[in-house]
Amino acid sequence: MTSDADRSTPDPDDTDGLTVGRAAKLVGVSVRTLHHWDAVGLVRPSGRTWAGHRVYSGDDVARVHRVLVYRELGFPLAQITRILDDPATDAGAHLRRQRGELVERIERLRRMVGAVDRMLEASTTGMRLSPRQQVEIFGDDWRPEWVDEAEQRWGRTAQWAQYSQRAAELSPADWEKVAAQTDALNADLAAAMRSGVAPGSAEANALAERHRAMMSTYFDCTHAMQACLGRMFVEDPGFAANYDKVAAGLAPWLRDVVFANAAAHGVDPETATWE
């Protein structure tokens, strides 16, 4: 006698293969994607349930994984189909190339993450020197609060973002070199002024370019930006006082030197803007 259990309807999923839903969940793609790949002949499920539903075999799922790898590497679907269906294709060689390209991509991504981390650190820390280190490196006249004041003035500019990133990458030893180079430049500027070097002369223009290169340690300083700084050296009492401590009258002389060099490079220093 046949029991009710013997007469129960067979499970349409009772098969050694995977339905499209289960296959999609297993490999991490959508059912729509698998249907599309089936329609274009990229991955066609090779098995069927008792009711005629198509199911994915182990080999079918392995092909899906290979498709995912090629797609991650940027191959178009049509090319992936040709690679997988070409009997002359050396699958092992392709996999080794894929692995090599993936390793290179991982390294690129690691470098990108490192760059983002440095930018994030720079945006929150900037100069990685304690107030005591700042005074030790830049001298007793240095005031650590000047960094905060500068951020309040220029913190929204692209140049401040550049400064923050670059400053965060400089070690105390790097800052000592920057301070020494700045002192040497200021001494050479004062000596040139005392010896009567005229703004616009070759020697003065060379000093102006040294000054611009020094400013470019912190951000990409154009001739127009340098002209704006030249005006500030005279108009801002703090800047003027710092240069006058090096040599009396240095601030207006440096402004004139910067102006003449900017004019030689096609910039009107009087109307130059921060760009």
Image (tube, grey):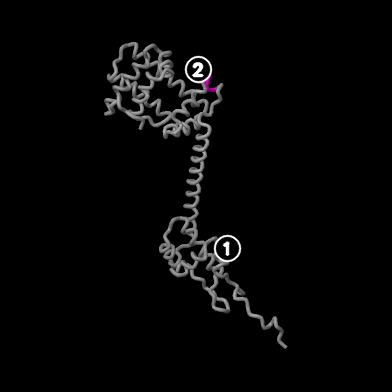
User: Type of residue at label 2?
Assistant: Gly
Precedes in sequence: disc 1 or disc 2: 1
Q: Label 2's element?
A: loop
User: Type of residue at label 1?
Assistant: Leu
Please state which of residues 76 and 272 is positioned toward the viewer in this rendering: 272
Q: Residues within 10 Å of mark 2 (few under 14, many from 20)?
A: few
Please state which of residues 112 and 30 is positioned toward the viewer in this rendering: 30
Indicate the position of residue 233 as horizontal and vertical percent values: 38, 20
Indicate the position of residue 75 as horizontal and vertical percent values: 43, 58
Query: Could you tell whether 198 is left or right of 81 in the image?
Result: left
Q: Which mark is residue 240?
A: none
The residue that label 1 is drawn on is: 26
Quarter of the image for the N terminus: give it. Answer: bottom right
Determine whether 219 is above or below 246 in the image: below
Please state which of residues 171 and 23 is positioned toward the viewer in this rendering: 23
Q: Label 1's element?
A: helix
The residue that label 2 is drawn on is: 139
Query: Could you tell whether 203 is left or right of 91 in the image?
Result: left
Query: Could you tell whether 257 is left or right of 172 in the image?
Result: left
Name the image quarter holding residue 55.
Answer: bottom right
Indicate the position of residue 152 as horizontal and vertical percent values: 47, 28
Q: Which residues are magenta?
A: 133-142
Q: CA distance from mark 1 to mark 2?
A: 65 Å
Q: Residues within 10 Å of mark 1 (few under 14, many from 20)?
A: few
Please state which of residues 67 and 113 is positioned toward the viewer in this rendering: 113
On whether residue 56 falls in the magenta region, the answer is: no
Indicate the position of residue 246 as horizontal and vertical percent values: 42, 14
What residue is rendered at 47% in x and 46% in y? Answer: 108
- Magenta: main secondary structure equals helix
